[in-house]
Amino acid sequence: MFLSFLQSAIRFSAIFLFGSVGETLTEKSGNLNLGIPGIMCMGGAGGLIGAAAYIKSLENISQMNGPSVVIIAMITAMLFGGLGGLIYSVLTISMRCNQNVTGLALTTFGIGLLAFVGGTVDTTGFTTVAVYFTKSFPFEEKLGGFGELFFSYGALVYIAFILAIISAVVIKKTRVGLNLRAVGENPATADAAGVSVTNYKYAATMIGSMIAGFGGLFYIMDYLGGNIEYSVDVYGWMAVALVIFTVWRPNWAILGSIIFSMLYLAPNYLDVSFAQKEVIKMMPYLVTIVVLVITSIVSKKESQPPASLGVTYFREER
Amino acid sequence: MAKSVAIQLKGISKYFGEVVANKNVDLTVYKGEILSVLGENGSGKTTLMNMLSGIYFPDEGQIFVDGAPVVIRSPRDAYQYGIGMVHQHFKLVDVFSAIDNVLLGEKAPEFALKEKSAELRERAAKATYVIDNDDTEAPVKTVRQTDTAFGRFRLNARIALLPLEKALYKARFNWLPRKRGQKIKEVAAKYGFEIDLNKKIYDMSVSEKQTVEIIKVLYRGADILILDEPTAVLTPQETQKLFDVIRNMREDGKSIIIITHKLNEVMEISDRVAVLRKGEHVATVNTAETDINELTEMMVGRKTELNIARALPENEQDRLEVSNLTLVNHENVKVLDNVSFTAHSGEILGIAGIAGSGQRELLETIAGLNRPTSGTISYNDPTTGKKENLVRKTPAQIRELGVRLSFVPEDRLGMGLVGNMDIIDNMMLRSYKRGKLPFLDRKNPKQLAENIIRDLEVVTPSSHTPVRRLSGGNIQKVLVGREIASAPTVLMAAYPVRGLDINSSYTIYNLLNTQKERGVAVIYVGEDLDVLIELCDRIMVICAGRVTGIVDGRKAKKEDIGLLMTGSVEIKEKEGCAND
């Protein structure tokens, strides 16, 4: 019972992980992208379009090639997520619009786009596609509980964990990460040191959005098994909260996302009333507020948000 | 030592709109020397050096590095020519360690594919094997590597793999090594810096931060270092340490340019002194052949006649008495040190001093924006005749008494006006609290705005134009106009003519004079000594937060004020015209 709870929590954590790793990368560059929930929706919509287009190109559904459909859906999800990031970047970096307003507008747009695509796209064969997305390692069953805990997931779950680790290493251990952090902390200093603030902001925001786009794809194709549901943005907001919860560290996001998904799924495994269920579902947000309070009391400089988060950089303004 | 030229400036000019920042400046810097660039505020020292470091681009003239003409368009260009500048405001990332700050933005040396493969080919063509046959008959044979099939294969394989090598090289550079501080530590040790490079910037003192900035410039390979007012923030001990390091750098053959206005330090550290005045180069002299008096004279220059009308003060009364005012800011620096003076009604009291000597803090403290650490500010109310202590009052209460601060800091729109609002709305910033109804009264402010536009000749399409669209002079007129409209008893103006052309400046002087004739106590913080001498009745000189003297504006000589400003001389009397 507990094993299957843990297993589904780890599986479900991927959606938070995609969202928060994408948002962390973006925020490290000083862009507070509140469009992440919408961008996750856009990624989901992109995945649906990619899969539907692939199915349409076949004469018969039985001809479907598993790896192809997974890769095509991933590429289209990435493109749509990246497109969201591009819109956000052009508006906030090049045209210097307000980041919060832009982000919220993008979220509204993304939710609408997913609803539109989900309602119009031909869903025939999606359940078959979902089978490929959830396909786990063949040796999983031979390993018993251990296999169930570590090898029972679809490819996207592993990709989420790998991306989180890569992001953490890049941010912490490389010059690219050093420059990126400087851009988010003090863009004027980075600029003076010869770092292209604009390029870094664009790249971080777009790569972050591509990663977040996978979140929507994972939710629909893997977690829901190909059934379209439009509540992706709810998990997007939790991912944004998770960024604060993990004090802007993608490696901590792995643990954080598992905790969040455990809190979110716990009611299903407990014998509790509806009201109690809803209270437990509130926990992630409560925990985030507590973390915010703690970090601001401790006021350790390293656990503060990037210093120029949400501020538009403009070189001539000195 | 044979002197060779490091940098030469020829005929450099820079204009900001109508304002001349630098005009036809010639300057030569030699290798292995310390050059001081000396001048008053606004004499164009920093602007000139910013053109060397790539912040500004000169409008006229040519820069030569090592004898060759160069174009410097960005700080990156400047680094390329070995010019590095340490600015007054440090550019450091707070949450990074010193090492990370130095490494920030460093680019890998170019991995040139073509050159590398050409080099490999060349080497292979020269490489030879010696084939020593054991069959003694055959002679020892030498074979070129490129003559054998295996040798050619090895060469081609190496060349084919070069892109991979390049990628590996890039990746290795991009990886922050665990020992990444080694080279930086070597640089620091070489010049005798004492600093923990793993310390985070937010834990550092100002002097340590400055050290990091200098190390950064040196690590990037600068041969010419420009230090902008390096000692302004340092204690005497730290200054001595810095000077030791600067001397080490000179021994190493580097050229160091120090922008300063502290004469004693000029005498102590520099080999030569270049003096700037009003954007023009006055002279460059050898430090050993000059003295403080001569430098002061060069710095302030002869008096120029401005013909600002100045009436004799009438009916003077003590309006504002400041005594023993001390203010310690949150960085624990004494910005005001035991300041005492009296401002009279019907006179203009000028405040002279090097920028940042505490002028701004003094006015802010009087206006109630800062709470002084000790001392009193007492105000004699002309209507009631009562004495009021301003220290315990809020800014709103102080304003109610008629003390007006028309503050004009570095950016005009920062304090006092809201750039995106029109002139009427800006008038309302002072009147919105009046009236009992929750609705705003727009009629009177509109009337006031139109009066100001008419009386002060503000050039604007209408009173509905956002003030940020107006020119600097017109913004200034709106600000000063609003403050005097409320019939103040004390009017404080800080740098009200900064950046204005001559005509606008005179309008402002006339405004202040009108106020003085109405019996207002005017306090004017200015930069231009000529203006202070012609406009003010008395001039108070402050240096590093201390009052070094109060002189009579009608009798004072420019050189004397200059000496007071740099703290070389001090007039001990508390009050009076001790200058003769």
Image (tube, rainbow, N blue to C red):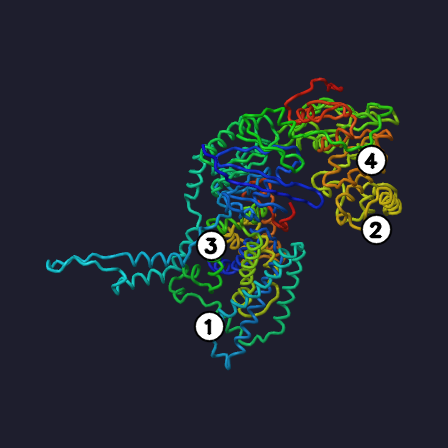
Name the residue beneath numbered marker 4. B510
Spatial CA span between label 4 and label 1: 85 Å
Residue occupying the point 61% across, 70% down: A118
- Choose between B436 and B15: the one closer to the eye: B15
Q: Is residue A17 in view from this perspective?
A: yes
- Residue B256: horizontal and vertical position, in percent? 52, 35
Q: Which is in the foreground here, disc 1 or disc 2?
A: 2
CA gap, disc 4 to disc 3?
68 Å
Q: Locate residue B122: give its quadrant.
A: bottom left
Q: CA distance from mark 1 to mark 2?
A: 70 Å
How far apart are the two marked residues, 3 and 2, measured between alpha carbons?
60 Å
Give the quarter of the image for residue A40. bottom right
Pinpoint residue B421: horizontal percent, then vertical percent.
78, 48
Q: How packed is label 3: few (under 14 Cα within 10 Å), some, or many (20 or more)?
A: some
Which label sits in the foreground, 4 or 1?
Answer: 4
Q: Amino acid at mark 1?
A: Gly
Residue denoted by label 2: B462
- Which element is circle 4 on? helix
Question: Is B112 displayed left or right of A128 in the figure?
Answer: left
Q: Mark 3 — residue?
A: A165
Is any part of residue A291 visible from this angle?
no
Disc 1 and disc 2 on one polypeptide chain: no
